[in-house]
Protein backbone atom coordinates (compact mmCIF):
# COMPACT_ATOMS: atom_id res chain seq x y z
CA UNK A 1 0.00 0.00 0.00
CA UNK A 2 1.53 3.26 -1.16
CA UNK A 3 1.77 6.04 1.38
CA UNK A 4 2.88 9.64 0.92
CA UNK A 5 3.62 11.48 4.14
CA UNK A 6 3.94 15.24 3.92
CA UNK A 7 5.28 17.72 6.44
CA UNK A 8 6.40 21.31 6.74
CA UNK A 9 3.39 23.52 6.08
CA UNK A 10 2.38 26.40 8.29
CA UNK A 11 1.90 30.13 8.66
CA UNK A 12 4.60 32.51 7.49
CA UNK A 13 4.86 36.22 6.87
CA UNK A 14 5.33 37.59 3.35
CA UNK A 15 8.97 37.30 2.34
CA UNK A 16 9.50 34.32 4.61
CA UNK A 17 10.49 30.75 3.85
CA UNK A 18 9.08 27.28 4.36
CA UNK A 19 10.30 23.82 3.41
CA UNK A 20 7.88 21.05 2.50
CA UNK A 21 8.90 17.40 2.61
CA UNK A 22 7.25 14.26 1.28
CA UNK A 23 8.27 10.65 1.82
CA UNK A 24 6.88 7.85 -0.35
CA UNK A 25 6.74 4.21 0.65
CA UNK A 26 4.95 0.97 -0.09
CA UNK A 27 5.77 0.25 -3.75
CA UNK A 28 8.40 -1.93 -5.34
CA UNK A 29 8.40 0.16 -8.52
CA UNK A 30 10.88 2.91 -9.25
CA UNK A 31 9.52 6.44 -9.00
CA UNK A 32 9.46 8.30 -12.30
CA UNK A 33 8.23 11.72 -11.21
CA UNK A 34 7.93 13.40 -7.83
CA UNK A 35 6.27 16.77 -7.53
CA UNK A 36 4.20 19.32 -5.69
CA UNK A 37 0.83 20.75 -6.65
CA UNK A 38 -1.25 23.36 -4.86
CA UNK A 39 -4.87 24.34 -4.66
CA UNK A 40 -6.05 27.71 -3.42
CA UNK A 41 -9.67 28.30 -2.35
CA UNK A 42 -11.94 28.54 -5.37
CA UNK A 43 -9.17 27.61 -7.79
CA UNK A 44 -8.13 24.48 -9.62
CA UNK A 45 -5.20 22.40 -8.47
CA UNK A 46 -2.04 23.45 -10.30
CA UNK A 47 1.43 22.06 -10.74
CA UNK A 48 4.02 23.94 -8.70
CA UNK A 49 7.10 21.90 -9.56
CA UNK A 50 8.15 18.39 -10.39
CA UNK A 51 11.37 16.46 -10.69
CA UNK A 52 11.90 13.51 -13.02
CA UNK A 53 14.08 10.50 -12.35
CA UNK A 54 16.90 12.01 -14.44
CA UNK A 55 16.91 15.10 -12.21
CA UNK A 56 15.30 17.44 -14.70
CA UNK A 57 12.79 19.86 -13.20
CA UNK A 58 9.78 21.92 -14.19
CA UNK A 59 8.37 24.94 -12.37
CA UNK A 60 5.26 26.99 -12.83
CA UNK A 61 6.29 30.50 -13.92
CA UNK A 62 4.97 32.17 -10.78
CA UNK A 63 7.47 30.35 -8.53
CA UNK A 64 10.57 30.37 -10.71
CA UNK A 65 13.53 31.85 -8.86
CA UNK A 66 11.79 31.49 -5.49
CA UNK A 67 11.06 27.76 -5.09
CA UNK A 68 13.47 24.86 -5.45
CA UNK A 69 12.47 21.22 -5.72
CA UNK A 70 14.87 18.43 -4.82
CA UNK A 71 14.54 14.68 -4.50
CA UNK A 72 16.49 11.86 -2.92
CA UNK A 73 16.06 8.74 -5.02
CA UNK A 74 17.59 6.50 -2.37
CA UNK A 75 15.09 7.65 0.26
CA UNK A 76 12.13 8.25 -2.07
CA UNK A 77 11.70 11.76 -0.73
CA UNK A 78 11.00 15.09 -2.39
CA UNK A 79 11.38 18.52 -0.81
CA UNK A 80 10.16 21.94 -1.87
CA UNK A 81 12.12 24.89 -0.55
CA UNK A 82 9.95 27.98 -0.77
CA UNK A 83 11.59 31.38 -0.37
CA UNK A 84 10.29 34.93 -0.76
CA UNK A 85 6.77 33.71 -0.12
CA UNK A 86 3.86 35.85 -1.22
CA UNK A 87 0.24 35.93 -0.08
CA UNK A 88 -0.74 34.43 -3.43
CA UNK A 89 1.26 31.32 -2.55
CA UNK A 90 -1.35 30.53 0.10
CA UNK A 91 -2.86 27.15 -0.71
CA UNK A 92 -3.01 23.51 0.25
CA UNK A 93 0.10 21.85 -1.15
CA UNK A 94 -0.05 18.24 -2.31
CA UNK A 95 2.77 15.84 -2.95
CA UNK A 96 2.37 13.74 -6.11
CA UNK A 97 4.29 10.65 -7.14
CA UNK A 98 4.15 8.69 -10.41
CA UNK A 99 5.70 5.25 -10.41
CA UNK A 100 7.25 3.36 -13.29
CA UNK A 101 4.03 1.35 -13.66
CA UNK A 102 2.37 4.71 -14.45
CA UNK A 103 0.26 4.73 -11.30
CA UNK A 104 0.07 8.07 -9.53
CA UNK A 105 -0.62 8.92 -5.92
CA UNK A 106 -1.39 12.01 -3.86
CA UNK A 107 -0.44 13.03 -0.36
CA UNK A 108 -3.02 14.24 2.12
CA UNK A 109 -2.12 17.90 1.62
CA UNK A 110 -0.46 20.45 3.86
CA UNK A 111 -1.66 24.02 4.38
CA UNK A 112 0.66 26.91 3.57
CA UNK A 113 -0.58 30.34 4.62
CA UNK A 114 1.35 33.50 3.82
CA UNK A 115 -0.02 36.43 5.77
CA UNK A 116 1.09 39.30 7.94
Image (cartoon, rainbow, N blue to C red):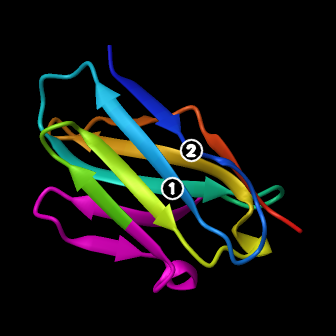
Residue shown at 79%/72% (left/top)?
87
> Which residue lies at the image location 36% right of the left edge and 64% below the top edge?
69
Q: Is residue 57 magenta?
A: yes
Q: Is residue 2 above or below residue 107?
A: above
Q: Residue furthest top?
A: 1
The magenta-colored residue range is 45-68
Q: Is residue 63 left or right of residue 103?
A: right
* Figure quadrant of the C terminus: bottom right
Answer with the quarter of the image where residue 23 lies.
top left
Query: Residue 8 — which label?
Result: 2
In which quadrant of the rendered view does residue 42 lie? bottom right
Assign the N terminus to one quadrant of the image: top left
Q: Residue at x 42, y 66 (%)?
A: 49
Query: Do labels 2 and 1 touch, CB within 8 Å?
Result: yes
Q: Against 52, is 28 above or below? A: above
Q: Which residue corresponds to the image point at 42% horizontal and 75% vertical from the top-left? A: 59
Mark 2 Cα-neighbour bin, 10 Å: few <14, some 14–19, many ≥20 = some
**Residue 25 inside the magenta-drawn segment:** no
Residue 76 place in picture, x, y as percent: 23, 38
Q: In what element is the residue under mark 1?
A: strand
The disc, 2 or 1, on the residue closer to the chain's N-terminal end is: 2
Lateral position of residue 87 relative to residue 85, left or right: right
- Determine the CA span between mark 2 and mark 1: 6 Å
Q: Which residue is labeled 1 in the image? A: 19
Name the secondary structure under disc 2.
loop
For this rendering, which residue is in front, 10 or 47? Answer: 10
- Is disc 1 surrounded by few (<14), some (14 to 19) or many (20+) residues within 10 Å? some
Given residues 35 and 10, the one toward you in this image is 10
Q: Position of residue 51 (x, y in %)?
A: 27, 61
Where does the image place residue 26, in percent across and percent down from the top left? Answer: 26, 18
Amino acid sequence: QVQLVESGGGLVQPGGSLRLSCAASGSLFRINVMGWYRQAPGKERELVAHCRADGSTTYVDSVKGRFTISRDNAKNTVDLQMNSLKPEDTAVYYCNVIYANMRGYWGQGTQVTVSS
